[in-house]
Image: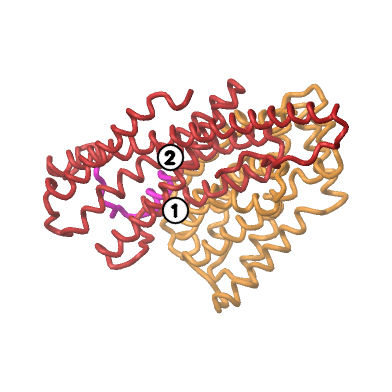
Chain colours: A orange, B red
Amino acid sequence: MIGTAWAILRKDLQIELRTKESVPAMALFSVTVFVLFHFGLQRNELEGDLAAGVLWVTLILATVLGVNRLFVAEREQGGIDGLLLAPIDRTSVFIAKASALFLYLVLLEIVAVPAFGILLLGPNLFTPLPTLVLLLVLADIGLASVGALVSALAVETRARDLIVPLLLLPLLVPVTIAGAEATEPLFSGSQAAHELGKWLGLLGLYDMVFLLVSIAVFDFLLED
Amino acid sequence: MYGKGLRTLSIAAAAAMGTALGLVFFYAPLDADQGFIQKIFYVHVPLAIVALFGFMAGGVMGIRYLRSGDRSWDMRSYVAIHLSIVLAVGVLISGSIWAKASWGHWWVWDEPTLVSFLIIFLLYCCYQPLRFSIEDPERQARYAAVFSIIAGAFVPLNFVAVRLAQAFSHPRVLSTTGGNLPGSMRLTFLVSLLAFALLWVTLWKLELTSKNASMQLKRLRRNLEGAFDEQRVPAGAPAPPVGTVPASPRES
């Protein structure tokens, strides 16, 4: 199962490397949103809750772009038939797609977080960076599993581009809550990382629930 | 097959609703702090509880559909979710009225229960667009079931998340210690909870019965038209288009 998942993942990454469709678009989008926030909020520097909110909302919105594209190659080029005909466990398709999205998100954050630090963030980015990385990785697991699931759910519908954000954004509210709440003290300059454990626990719970639910129901989405 | 017991159920629901309203207006004491407006609590909270359980029941019915492949479970799940969305609108409106009366604002963000409810409502609002943008009926049922399961799992998780994020300010009625509700208020509350639960079940059964009946009617009509066409073809005349049948059983 891991072998097939790895094969599908490698294929996805190769397509992404050659077409450069998702990750550059997500990164560019997030930088553009930072610029929008600069003018929308009319601030040159953000800190505390405002900074945490802008960063997380931007990352969540950029995730929508990635989720929109995740199954498009399969659907438009007919690759999905090959996947369905292949004698493989459907769960490996999920694992491959979720891992691909996870990697896209990590790449996105490698660009977007420093860009945020340069463009908008008032306090120094380096001191809270280890905690922030931990939070982002935990959040990415949840985003990737929910995103792969929603992408597979929406790709068959007529109004795919509408269904993805409508479905995904409410599902991601807990991630936004945990991420923004845990990041706020990191960006407000105070060293006291209060209640960090609570939010890490919430993110962990979210990841676990949605990984299990996704693995349980994903088979039904690719069943014809 | 769905109509069985519908009459008894309707009478029970009507009686429970009447009793609940009677208790609310004539038996339950006025709240010392909030006065008359507090009585909206007997509508708002039971509605919310019933709607949430309806959403989760829709998820359980979705699981049963996926396990059995029996389309009637899909129909049950669809009606349960659809009905709970309607109740959820009532929850948000009654909650807003109550918030305006007791806190002076139509919407209060630092009230976790209301906020979680809004998020869940927004999520379930996608159920129908998702469902009806899939054409193949079998796939429609399958995808809707998957959605109902994901969303059903999301309901408790979302409550945990929003509750963690905010300071406690919502009046909790059924806390572990039994709450601070005097006996007469609690009795009234429980009766109206029962009344709304019965109302939900009655409406659910009613809609299932009606959907089932209209599907049967459509089937019969189609058979009848088929019979007509067969009779006409040998007579030599080209069959004129008889009354068209709607293609998909969208909600009426």
Between the residue at mark 1 and the residue at mark 2, the CA separation in whole angstroms equals 14 Å
Task: Report which residue position mark 1 lands on.
Answer: B118
Relative horizontal placement of residue B111, taking residue B25 as reference (left or right):
right
Can you tell which quarter of the image residue B183 is in? top left
Residue B15, percent from left and from top = 25, 36
Residue occupying image coordinates x 25% and y 51%: B41
The residue wearing badge 2 is B156
User: Height in image: A73 above or below B11?
Assistant: below
Image check: B175 left or right of A83? Answer: left
| Placement of B97 over or under A152, stated as above or below | below
Return the residue nearer the eye: A167 or B140.
B140
Q: Where in the figure is residue A57, as x and y percent of width and height?
A: 57, 60
Q: Is residue B128 left or right of residue B92?
A: right
- On screen, residue B232 versus residue A159, left or right, reads right
- The reply to whether residue A102 is visible in this rendering is no
> For residue B149, which quarter of the picture?
top right
The residue type indicated by label 2 comes to: Pro
Residue placed at 85% from the left, 37% from the top?
B238
- Give residue B102's position: percent from left, percent from top: 24, 62
The spot of residue A164 in percent (x, y) is: 65, 50
Earlier in the chain: of badge 1 and badge 2, it is 1
Outermost residue, front side: B235
Q: How many marks?
A: 2
The magenta span reads B159-173
User: Which residue is nearer to you in this view: B249 or B229?
Assistant: B229
